[in-house]
Image (spheres, helix red, strand yellow):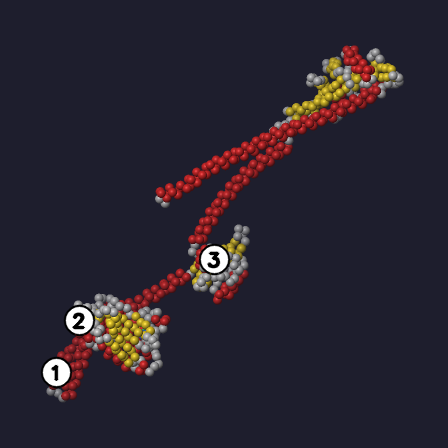
Amino acid sequence: MNADDGATSSKPAWRWLGGLQPLRKSRSLLWALLVLLVGSSLVLLIWLAGRYESSAAQERLEAYTADLATQMRQGMSRNLRSLQALQPDRDPAWQAHAHELLQQRRELIRVEWRDTELRPDRVSDSPYRPPAFESFDRSLSAADVGLACRAAQRFNAPAYSNSYFVPQSNGMGLELMDVCLPLMATGQLIGFTVATYALNDMLSELLGAQLTRGHAVSFAEADGTRLAMYGSAGSGRRLFVAQQLVDLSGNTLVLRLESRQGTADLFPNLLTALVTAMTLALCVVLLMLVRDMRRRLKVEHDLAEALAFRKAMENSLNTGLRARDLEGRITYVNPAFCQMVGVRAEELLHHRASPAPYWPPELANVYQDRQTFRMANKALPRGGHESVFMRSDGTRFPVLIIEAPLINALGKHTGWMSAVLDLSEQKRAEEISRASQDRLQATARLAMVGEMASLLSHELNQPLAAISSYANGSLNVLRDTQAALLTGTPEQRRLSGDLEMALRRIAEQAGRAGKVIKSVHDFVRRREQKREAVQPMDLIDAIMPLVSLQARKLGVRVVITAEPSCPQVLCDPTMVEQVLLNLARNGMQAMQAVPEQASDRVLHLRVQRSGKNGVEFSVTDVGEGIAEEVASQLFTPFFTTKDEGMGLGLSLCRTVVEQHGSSLSFKAHPPRGTVFAFTLSAATPDSPPPSQAALTPRLPAFFKP
Ligand code: ADP
């Protein structure tokens, strides 16, 4: 990638990243807001819960105080009833009953019977403590008692005095309160029963049994001064206080309850702690979920990438991929497979197991059996197996199928995966390679034949030269002795003439044979062949002696047709003669295969003009004709249908004709037979004239035995 590419390709990425920045910012803002919200809701929750808890505790305390006040009132009413039962005028055992009462009610420390002038008549002190007024003059509290008794007398009902402090001999003191009950007899006041309460003992005796731990109960004045107290308020940090008025005739006591509670800390109660813990746990779970989601997203992204990569890989593959389930139904195919068989994926997927649309119908049974066997035995050939598939257009093609079991993520065998390779190209390449191998072999054999021909021509040159020399020598000798022979008998003279003629022919033919050999040698060595201007009919004439000889032998009639205006042609006459001779021979041999009357066997040699500057030579027979399978190999070296044939004739003929710039063609000759033809170009005025030897009858063809 060059610098420009880098610049252009990175631009969108930056843009993308730029677009991501505000997104990230707003996401962090959202997160901060969420944390703030959760935090403030938690604080609010804790505060509200604390407040609720406090008010609940306060309410509980208020209710408790009310209970205690009721309890206190009940206890005092009960005491009043007991005091009213003390009748000194009728009860001689007043003292004993008063004592008994003081024994039972510890909150009462003294009971007095006073006359109408409020003078103490009888007195009984509590057996549980030293007499309260031992070191304190009782008369000092007379005013309070007097007020209470006068009020009692006025209303004819019990009345209470204000509380007052009485110091004790032990340095401590007691807060006391008197209750005065007027005693009437026949409508006349006869005296007062005065009972003295110790406020401390009132609290402990009347409420002590009910008071729970962590509570302090006290009597207080309206300004908050504590008069007496019982119990402990506990050690908590928060102090809860509740008050109740205990209304008594002549006095009103304030009952005050205190309780310290230490739980009003961060989490006032279990519920708040639970809610807080659950919220925090929720946050942690949320965070974990976000992390998990991120991880999932990453995994999904990676998975999508891997999937895209796999898809691209599958699409780029030339190999067909096919997955089948255990019933043989196709569950997956890649594009290469669809392309291979020419069927769309939708038509293949979940198609019933068999026959598959790409099975050739004639092989469907075999494939079906094979599939059933494989799936039952789970036996797959290692390295795959070859098969034949059918395209949608019906053409068959060879394939190599390599199969492997499909194992899912749980390790269960769910089907089969096959890789399918189209072997058409490979087979074609093999075919081409085999053909070229054959051609190579043929070429090698041809080269060998060429070598042999070259060797032969070299070897034959010597004896032919010797024959020619001997024939010429013999002619010379004959000429020298001719004078002597002139005197001989006519028979001797005729014999001498014949001998001379024969010797001349021997010398000529030996010379001609030498030329043929040289031509062959040149042909094999591919040297520059000589070209001469020759009359077309001369070429025919040159082969006629040999053609006639064979025609007579095979019972063939030879017909020659020549256009008189044919110009001279430029060629290597020796070679062209051999071509004509070879074609004529093939034609005559082809006619042998046809069982016909000899008169029907006609070989037609024709010479005619072709175009402006050409002369066409054709050889027509009425033989068996050339079958299609023979036609395709006609010019292949060493191809022959004859027992004694070499299969080189036509191949060499074509080479010779092509060397003359033409082509050797053939076609059927209706109704029977074949026409072989080639064209030679006409000679130009500056073409070399024919040599003498070219116009003389020729030696037997070198192409044919
Ligand atoms: P050969 O004659 O030695 O067999 P050729 O190359 O001349 O070799 O011929 C090759 C084959 O071509 C022959 O074997 C014959 O089958 C076929 N052939 C050649 N000419 C003819 C023809 N005129 N008619 C029928 N078949 C022919």
Residue 378: image location, x then y, percent: 52, 59
Taking the spot 49% from the left edge, 60% from the top edge, the residue there is 380
Q: Quadrant of the C terminus?
A: bottom left
Structural crowding at the residue carrying mark 2, measured as other residues with C-alpha within 10 Å and reported as few (<14), some (14–19) or many (≥20): some
* Residue 370 or residue 678, whichever sits in front: 678
Taking the spot 22% from the left edge, 71% from the top edge, the residue there is 569
Q: Quadrant of the N terminus?
A: top left
Taking the spot 31% from the left edge, 70% from the top edge, the residue there is 635
Residue on which the image places disc 1? 481
| Dot 3 and dot 1 residues touching (CB under 8 Å) | no
Quadrant of the picture in which ligand 1 is shown: bottom left
Which amino acid type is marked by label 1?
A: Thr
- Mark 1–mark 2 Cα distance, whole angstroms, equals 37 Å
Looking at the rendering, which quadrant does residue 254 occupy? top right
* Residue 498 or residue 324, whichever sits in front: 324
Which amino acid type is marked by label 2?
A: Pro
Looking at the rendering, which quadrant does residue 179 occupy? top right
Q: Against 407, is 365 above or below? A: below
Residue 92: image location, x then y, percent: 88, 17
Q: Which label number is shown at residue 2?
A: none
Q: Is residue 12 visible?
A: yes
Labels 3 and 1: the sequence-earlier one:
3
Q: Which label number is shown at residue 689?
A: 2
| Dot 1 and dot 2 residues touching (CB under 8 Å) | no
Looking at the image, residue 346 sits to the left or right of residue 534; the answer is right
Residue on which the image places disc 3? 344
- Mark 3–mark 2 Cα distance, whole angstroms, equals 73 Å
Looking at the image, residue 130 sits to the left or right of residue 647; the answer is right
Residue 299: image location, x then y, percent: 50, 44
Between marks 3 and 2 in the image, the one whose residue lies nearer the viewer: 3
